Structure formats: C-alpha cells, structure tokens
Amino acid sequence: MGIMRSMFKNVFGSDTIKQVPTKNIQMFSGGDTFYVNTIDYFDNDIVVSCIRPKATEIGKLTLNLIRTNKDGKTEIDFDPSLRYLLRFPNEIMTMQDLLEKMVWQYETTGNTYAYILRDTYTGQVISINALETSMVRVCESLNGILMMEISFSNGKKAIVPYSDIIHLRKDFIGEFYGQPLKRALNEVLKTVRTIDLGTQKAIASNGIIKWLLTWSGTYKLEDQIAAAEAFRKAFLDPESNVGGVATVDNKATATQIKEDIYMPNEKAFLVYRKRVMDFFGVNEKIVAREYTEDIYNSFYEMEIEPFARKFADQLTLKLLTKNQFNSYGNQIIANATSLQYASMKSKIELYQMVDRGAMTPNEWRKVMNLPTVDGADDLIRRLDTEPVNDTKKKTDPLKVEEKDPIEEDDEEDSEDKGGD
C-alpha cells in the first residue's frame, strides 16, 4: 500500500512545521484570535445564490505582472516564473479555482487566507494555496517578526510569517480581522428559515387526512381502523375501479376534508429576501443573470473591482520587494472587463478607441468575441489625429497657402521688368 498523500504537506511543504516560539501582541482593542464561524451558510439557498455570481465573476480575473519604465511604457508578463504562478498557483488549482474558493470564505467569514510556499534556499515561490482554517491568531516571534498561528479542523497547526500569508478582509472595522456576517445576518436568516419551515409543516399536515369517517355508534378503535383501511383501498386507491364514486352504510358518514394549502405572506418573504441580497450587494437581476449593461457595470464597480484590487495589492506586497516596486515600477494587477456584458452598440462604438490608439485591433476583437489576427497587436492612429503635445507645425495638403498682397505686387513688378 502506497503512502497516503498529505494535503498539509502539499500546502506547507512538510508534514510538520517547526513550532516557532512566539509572544502575544498587545492590541488596542479586542483580541488577537479569530475563530472561524462554524455556521453552514451553504444550507440557505438565498445566501448561496447571492455569493455565487461574485465568485464566478471574480474567478474570471486575469492577473498580470507589469513593469512601467521611466518612459512610461508598460511591459507585461516579463517574468516567466510568475506568469505561470499567476495562472496555475498550485498543482490542484487554477487561479480561477483559487479565487472562487477565497471569495466564498471572504463573503461568509469576513476573512480569507492563502499561504505562499517558498523554496527554503532560493526563496522562489513554489505555490499559493487557499487555507480552510478553524482558528487563526496573530502573534510575534521572539525576534520581532509578525507571525500567524493557523489551526485546522483536523487538529494540525502551523505558525508561519505573516509575510507569507495573503489575507483579505471584509468589513475591516476591527483591529486585525474582518467582521463575519454572523451578527448582522443571522436574525434575518432565522426569519427566512421560520417561514420555510412553517410552509413545509403546513403543506405536510394538510395532506395527512383527506377523508373523515364519522361513526353513528361506538366501535372499537381496531374496528374503526379496519373500516377506514377498507374504505381507502376500495375508493381512494388509484388502482381501484370505482369511477370516482364512494359509498358507506348507515354506520358512518364520510366527509371529504377540503384542501387549504398554506402559503406565507409573499410580501413579507420578499422583504427578507431583499434584505439578504442587499447585505451581499446583489439584486434579483444579478442573481437571475438577467442584468443589463448598466446593472452589471454597477455590480462590477461595487463588488468585483474592490476584491480585485485587494487581491492584486496583496500579491504585489507579498511576492515583490519594495525595490522592485519603487525603482522598477513592478506590480501585479488584476484585470477584469465588464465590456463582455456591454450592448452590441457599445461594443461597436469602441472602434473609436482603436482609431485613437487607446486599444489595439486585437483587443477590440476580443471584446467582440472574435479570434485575434496577425499584425493587429500594435496600437494604430488615424492619419487625421496627432498627439496633443506635438507642437511641430504640419502643412495641410488640402489647404492653399495665402500670400501677402504686397509680396504679390512685388512679384508682378519683377515679372514686368523681366519682360522689358
């Protein structure tokens, strides 16, 4: 039997991590420990339907390492090792998988973490893995390095430098951690669950008894049950051939129970549903994927772009040095375009950006969901346009130069003299 793969080793590079002696950090307020909310929000369909659009759209982010030189020109993906890492962060995930997983944790717990595994000798980044923690604690090593103690549900624990942790926080009003949605959302979800449970019970109980046999005398319970069962088989069984007609003798009277299916107050339910959606920053159009260009642009700016910037800044901070950022203009950016949901009219009008050198023809073709073509990756500009800072005088070939009248008279005089 082969050795079972250890996911702990897969993430941290070893089955065991040397426990570094640490000391507590004195906070201004609150504690240094964060316990992950154990309530399973995935049981609620409204919560899931609110988070899924975010996870899906954020998963489409494209990450690039760029360098801006002194001339202001930008070079993209100049480091092959990081180019691969930003597409395939570890052996079991693409960057889309990693982002989607982090979004679900970010939305439900207020915090999400990923560990950067580096080569012990070279410091080269090997992988980036999202962490499913049960408890985290910020602390400090004895030599003053900021550390994070991470505990997992299987009992394992790791203490690693905070500089190797990608940490995104939502509702960051505390001192170190984002705020979980437990306090703000639980009461609303309790009401939604109560409405659902009440509906289920009412529907279930309404279908228990369909006919009532009222006896004219006193009979043993066993006889009543036997008679009721005989009545059911004879007249209520779908396979009975009675043509919809039932009969009883004078010992009992059969009364059909009217069905009255209970439905909750629809307006009240929609109010609570909207409260949950407002909490997550979505609406019915986003959840149902029926959004227009304007609705998606608003959703993108308010919900997608902030996460994209946080994630890109964390990667820049944790994967690059200050010198690379300050001296060479290196940074990691997260590109996400909302143009894919633009109307056809808006997409076609983007040709003006191509004419003015703001987009390459291939970038425009990508927006139109068209394949790229050779020779269309360079910026072009129409001949009747020019940079605004170009002060060099240019002659318009269509404009006839006007001469000074005095100069024209002098030329005529010289021609007359020449004629004599």
Image (tube, rainbow, N blue to C red):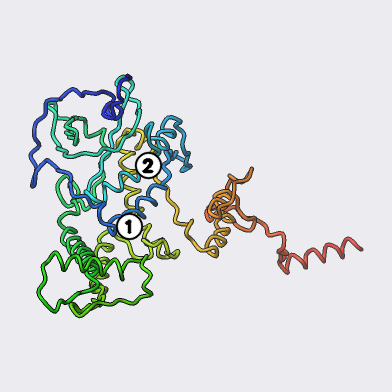
Name the residue located 29 percent from the left edge and 25 percent from the top edge. 13
User: What residue do we see at 54% from left, 63% from top?
Assistant: 344
Q: Quadrant of the N terminus?
A: top left
Q: How crowded is the residue under tag 2: few (<14 C-alpha within 10 Å), some, or many (20+)?
A: some
From what the image shows, is residue 188 above or below residue 371? Answer: below
Please state which of residues 371 and 49 is positioned toward the viewer in this rendering. Answer: 49
2 or 1: mark nearer the eye: 1
Instruction: Judge by depth and name the residue closer to the eye, 168 or 263.
Output: 263
Q: x, y percentage for residue 78? A: 46, 34
In the image as oriented, which residue stretches furthest toward the right? 420
Label pair 2/1, CB-CB below 8 angstroms: no
Residue appearing at x 26%, y 33% in the figure: 164
Q: Is 220 situated above or below 373?
A: below
Q: Is residue 398 left or right of residue 43?
A: right
* Residue 127 placement, left or right of 370: left
Label 1 crowd bin: few (<14), some (14–19), many (20+), radius 10 Å: some
Alpha carbons under labels 2 and 1: distance apart: 18 Å
Q: Tag 2's secondary structure?
A: helix
Going from the N terminus, do you reach mark 2 or mark 1 first? Answer: 1
Amino acid under label 1? Answer: Ser
**Residue 257 coordinates in the image, percent (x, y):** 23, 76
Q: Looking at the image, is 187 positioned above or below residue 381?
A: below
- Res 131 → quadrant: top left
Q: Which residue is mark 1?
A: 49
Tell me the residue that label 2 is attached to. Answer: 97
What is the x, y in percent for residue 399? 71, 64
Query: What residue appears at the point 72 percent right and 59 percent down from the top-left corner?
Result: 397
Nearest the viewer among 316 and 53 is 53
- Going by the numbered disc 2, the residue's amino acid type is Asp
Residue 287: percent from left, percent from top: 36, 61
